[in-house]
Amino acid sequence: MEALAIIADVLTPGNLLAMLVGVVGGLCIGSLPGLTANLGVALLLPVTFKMDVTPALLMLMSLYTSAIYGGSFSAILLHTPGTSASAATAIDGFALTRKGEFNKAIRISTFASVTGGVASALALLLIAPPLSYLSLKFGPAEYFMLAVFGLTVIGTLASGNMVKGLIAGAVGLFLSTVGLDLDSGIPRYAFGSTEVHGGIGFVPAVIGLFSLSQALLMCEEAHRSIQLTDVIKGAWRYLPTWDEFRRIRMTVGRSSIIGIIVGILPGAGGDIGSWVAYNEAKRFASKDSEFGKGSILGIAASETANNATTGSALIPLLTLGIPGSATAAVLLGALIIHGLLPGRTLFTEHAHVTYTVIMGFLLANLLMGVIGMTVGRYMNHVTRLPNSSLIPGVVMLSIVGSYSLGNNLFDVYTMLAFGGIGYLMRKGGFAPAPMVLGLILGPIAETGFRQAAVLAKGPLLVYILGSPISMVLFALTLLSIASALYLEIKRIRSIRQEHADA
Amino acid sequence: MLWVNRIVGAAIIVAAFLLWELAAEFPADARQFPRVTLVAIALLSAIMIARSFISAVAPIGDGEGTRSLAAIIRPIAVFVLVVLAVIAMHFIGFFPAMAALALCLMPLLQVKYRISYGLACLSLFLFIYVLFVAFLNVPLTTSQLLSF
């Protein structure tokens, strides 16, 4: 009966409208080169403040998955991925478009994205509830180590430069301490301002770091626009042909699994998933001479995997509070803002909300396919919008979004400050995602740290590393640093080699 | 870009030291965690500086966007205009300030199709009005000059 009640809840007009807004918004944002899923979720976050928790989360999650799919439109049409997760799609997708087979590329991309998204929603539904039991075994020391691990992983893997990623994360942790200390009531680093006593606003910071900084980056190439010739020949077909389905089914299945596994790994988002799946598809299709020149297998692999990471990135987020991707880090903030804490309680006390959101996420993936194919033939007009038209939109929505949080200009100034900082950070190679995560995980880390300091009878470090879970998290932290270091040095060497060869 | 890493790293270390000193005013419990993060920040910054001197592990290709100092002039100018528009919001109201911002951005962003740009801005204002003012009841700032 509960399952029926959840399905009925998903299908209420309010929730369906929320999904529709999220899906359409995500498609538009994803298809525009330069605008990312992070930016979309950050801009939409203030709009959801006054909404009920279920439609609010549904709207954000629908936007997330739809923006990843939307990235394929500009990748296929312009050879310019709308999001980094669609970079691999651009190779074969654009090659097909140049042959006048835009429709074929889009229908394969849509089918693959929907399948990957649905598979990841099912994985979320099946894996998250049992995994959430693990959170019951967490005490202060484990929560502290969890925050350190989450931050390390995002800092090392999600950004190109390990040390800079870690610095950004640590600065985020530090910034989370600004404001009144909840135990003593003493303001910390407020510099006489009473407006920061409540701490640095998470949402204005996110809007600044992701949205305004992106608009400023786009200013560097403000006049960029791309002209297209006719890309659609013949009648518009909505589904793959039987022959196409037979060719891609194994690739789609394999890429779904790859995407789900990669998505669960904290820090490894859609871009890594799509490249891994693309390379695997290439390996399996060694006899396909079309691979890289317009093969539907390449599109299917990349698009299945990047959407398969969306739902699975929410598995560590909902169960342990570790976001699987940068966008999931913003979603973690949304959960907390709406009064939901990751962990077992999401599947007990708030089970109805959680399962409604997961079921809604599954439905949103189907909705995304229907809308994507319906509007697909017109998307070439959207993707051609020049930066000069997009920049005022992003800037003004950032201003009004941050103002609407508390109807005060201080939030707007906070957003502006983080926008400026975010732009300079991105120019200097510091990824903003670890800083956002530091801001979110800061209070959890500090509470764990202070409680552990009270409970520890001997040295604090010995207490924190005293439990098996903490030890495992510590080992994983070291492992993530070591692997990131190895990958980075390998990348530097290969770049140097390329330079030497050139 | 290596010199940027060195300057930024040094600045962060100095800032961390100053913030460490400021923490001395807090109660013992309240200063522990910020100081732990400051130590981490300073150590990592030192590593970043050290790395920039070792050619085998010095980072390559950091940073997004165009790789020239001239390229950041336009974003900085846009940022200054946005800050001025937000300050003006307080005095002349949200929509007039944003309209002025949109006008000032036109030459800076090298807008070619002015009518399309104007229509896009008008649509944006309408969208903001419907969503934020009419639907979400956000009281956007209005002109203070009219109240005198």
Image: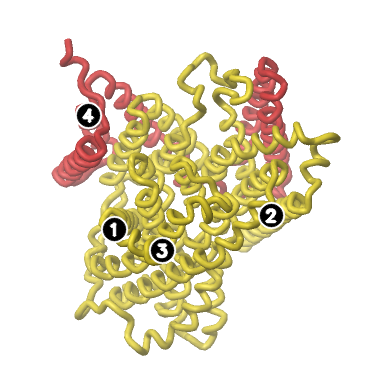
Q: Secondary structure at mark 1?
A: loop
Q: Position of residue B138 (x, y in %)?
A: 27, 32
> Residue at horizontal 35%, vertical 26%?
B83
Q: In the shown orientation, is residue B143 left or right of residue A439?
A: left
Badge 2, how many Cα within 10 Å: few under 14, some, many 20+?
many
The reply to whether residue A208 is visible in this rendering is yes
The numbered mark at residue A359 is 3
Q: Which chain is red?
A: B
Above or below: residue A105 compared with residue A17: below
**Which amino acid does the dot numbered 3 rest on?**
Met
The mark closer to the camera, 1 or 4, is: 1
Above or below: residue A22 compared with residue A99: above
The numbered mark at residue A480 is 2
Q: Position of residue B34 (x, y in %)?
A: 66, 28
Q: Position of residue A388 (x, y in %)?
A: 28, 44
The numbered mark at residue B100 is 4
